[in-house]
Amino acid sequence: MKVITTEKAPAAIGPYSQGYISGNLVFTSGQIPIDPATGELKSGIEEQAHQSCRNVIEILKAAGTDATKVIKTVCYISDMDQFSAFNKVYEQYFPSKPARSCVQVARLPKDVFCEIEAVAEV
């Protein structure tokens, strides 16, 4: 196994890694909408979805792969009423339509609106 780290995605805010390569797969940790350049959170579901997607993509790049190789994502949103707005952003980053689960959760770290994790082929 190989740990994946990049300064182009936020550093872990807990005892975990940004991602791992195991065999020919990369597993990203869930990415919340922290701008890695400033450490600030984006506001609004659309801006947060964009930043979460960008963070996942940067980890994939650091692992030597990209969004076209994503097999599965898991998306967490804090309000299912934001599902449509979230999807409009998400589909811009994952046009290959990987398998996906999307669930509403009671609360996410730093009270963000969304979090995304991915599994991709390297």
Image (cartoon, rainbow, N blue to C red):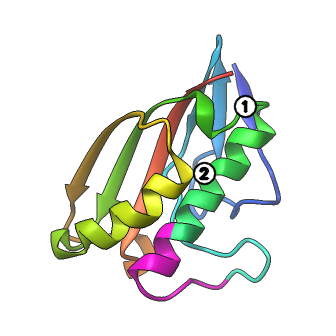
Check if residue 47 falls in the magenta segment.
yes
Secondary structure beneath dot 1 equals loop
Tell me what residue is drawn at x 35 percent, y 61 percent.
87
Q: Quadrant of residue 100?
A: top left
Left-right relation of 114 to 77: right
Mark 1 → mark 2, Cα distance in angstroms: 11 Å
Q: Which residue is mark 2?
A: 56
Q: Tell me the kind of residue under disc 1.
A: Thr
Residue 10 at what x, y percent from top left? 69, 64
Q: Tell me the kind of residue under disc 2.
A: Val
Left-right relation of 77 to 46: left
Please state, as top left, top right, bottom left or bottom right, where the N terminus lies in the image: top right
Tell me the magenta residue range: 40-49
Question: Of 67 and 78, which appears nearest the observer?
Answer: 67
Q: Which residue is mark 1?
A: 65
Question: Of 46 and 77, which appears nearest the observer?
Answer: 46
Check if residue 46 falls in the magenta segment.
yes
Q: Image height check: is 60 above or below 58?
A: above
